[in-house]
Image (cartoon, rainbow, N blue to C red):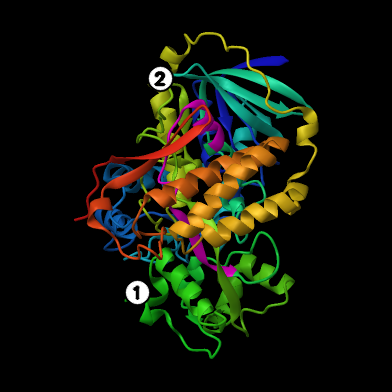
Amino acid sequence: MQRVQTDVLVIGSGVAGLYAALKLSELAQVMLVTKSAWHQSNSSQAQGGIAVAVGDGDSVAAHVQDTLRSGCGLNNREAVEVLAAYSFSVLDDLLRLGVPFDTDLAGRLELGREGFHSFPRVIHAGGDATGASIVHTLMQCVQAEENISVYEQTFVEQLVADGARCLGALLFTQGKHVLVQADAVILATGGCGQLYRETTNTLFSTGDGMAVASEAGAELVDMEFVQFHPTALAVPVHPKPLISEAVRGEGAVLVNGQGEPFMVQYHAWADLAPRDVVARAIFDQQQKGQRVYLDTTRLGSVFERRFPTIYRRCRELGFDPVTQPLPVTPAAHFIMGGVWTDEWGRTALDGLYACGEVACTGVHGANRLASNSLLEALVFANRIAEALREDINRMAAATAVMDVQPRFTDRHYALSARELMNHQATRELQEMMWADAGLVRTASGLNRLEAKLHEWESAWAHHHPVWWHMVRVAQAITRSALARTESRGAHYRADYPDEREEWRHIRTKWRRSTHECSPVTGTVETSVN
């Protein structure tokens, strides 16, 4: 087996991975690997912007308060304050690097309004192509750095750890396994939306980073909190095209089949209510037999100018958002939970760091505020780089990587991503996750799902590494959802429909030891003023 040594191994090529690699290249040799082509991350699809409190009357305190309110009392306040305070330096850095953020005729940054933000503070690029614009700029910067080597189509099969410390990773690339020893490993692998039948996530969002971290001994927290974006375009394609929340921020309104607005029945903020509220309201309308539409005709010709990417995609699929309302439906979009980290991206395993959607600092609580995700990825990627300035000298004394045996052979990797997602086994998993661990959950459904996951674990998870990872992450979501006997934020239990005070400061933790999995609860300090 080929062995490779590097100072820092970064796994993932979204905004978090690219920014971490770029910042670390100043002090170390960086190896960046991605399971896809490096422009195929969820970050590249992100239509929303980054939230920075630069507008008149806005403030860090207001951004913090909005994030805490959206998180339903479960946020790690320290992480929220870091997010809001560091947003300014990240914005300045992105402008310095050349990200073409949208400006008005006077050259001032345009600020948009999105759900549950008390001020217009969302900064976009290319109208609705913020993620792609940032990724493109960061990719150009990474390619110019001699200290960064990039490997595409490279899959992380497992992390290598000695119980207390992460020593590297076992990768599969170009038909062979490669063992990488690294002083530090950074997970930036994104989320797990492909666990669900309806999702906006790319085909590569299968929870790999969460699975390998858990197997190595890291903790997963808040895994029950899966965010379902309210407005995916209701068309028979997979993944579903996203209709950005910013469209509602510009004045589009959700209506039922009779053209009647209905969100005022569910929340005082109506169409700009938190995502969990809007998604469940649409689901409720659907359960009552209604089709739900986003009336974009109110925007007129502004739509095409303001949202060119969405406009082109709608037209490709036979819709004209200028003249007709768009059929929409909720879809899995983001997970608030992930690999536990502190506010510097450090996990429970020495030498292992995580940032972006794969990580969980607690910054989002039970429900993410719109346009905080790209910001989170950037802020905490930069924090990891700062932490490693101190940590890496200590890390350099690492012991040699132990021998590790691959769990899978080259024939297990035969299926392409598209073939894998179209496989009957994958579709069955996605259907059951959507039905029993989706927008509305019950103990009976979750128990049924848990039993089926155990069956799948024995029957076919060993046939492909992605299936193995998907089943592991699905188990974490299911058992965490069973453990939380209340409804809070994105986690809704029909058999426990209310928030319960005893759960207000409790976060579920998922630990793994050999083949046994069990969620345990632990208190964290959070507060909302």
Nearest the viewer among 435 and 322 is: 435
* Residue 219 lies in the magenta stretch: yes
- The image quadrant that residue 498 belongs to is bottom left
Query: Range of the magenta residues?
Result: 211-232
**Location of residue 392 with respect to 515 vertically, above or below:** above
Which three-letter amino acid code belongs to the residue tagged 2?
Asp
Quadrant (top left, top right, bottom left, bottom right) of the N terminus: top right
- The image quadrant that residue 249 belongs to is bottom left
Q: Residue furthest bottom?
A: 258
Residue lying at 63% horizontally and 72% vertically, measured from the top left: 234
Nearest the viewer among 36 and 458 is: 458
Residue lying at 42% horizontally and 51% vertically, measured from the top left: 482
**Location of residue 461 with respect to 387 vertically, above or below:** below
Expressed as whole percent of the image width and height from the top left, the position of residue 471 reads 59, 43
Q: Which mark is residue 269?
A: 1
Nearest the viewer among 18 and 486 is: 486
Query: Nearer the N terminus, badge 1 or badge 2?
Result: 1
Is residue 463 found left or right of 64 in the rendered image? Answer: right
**Location of residue 376 with respect to 216 vertically, above or below:** below
Residue neighbourhood size for the residue with mark 1, other residues' Cα within 10 Å, grouped as few (<14), some (14–19), many (≥20): few
Nearest the viewer among 317 and 127 is: 317
Residue neighbourhood size for the residue with mark 2, other residues' Cα within 10 Å, grouped as few (<14), some (14–19), many (≥20): some
* Residue 113 lies in the magenta stretch: no
Q: Which residue has dot 2 on it?
A: 391
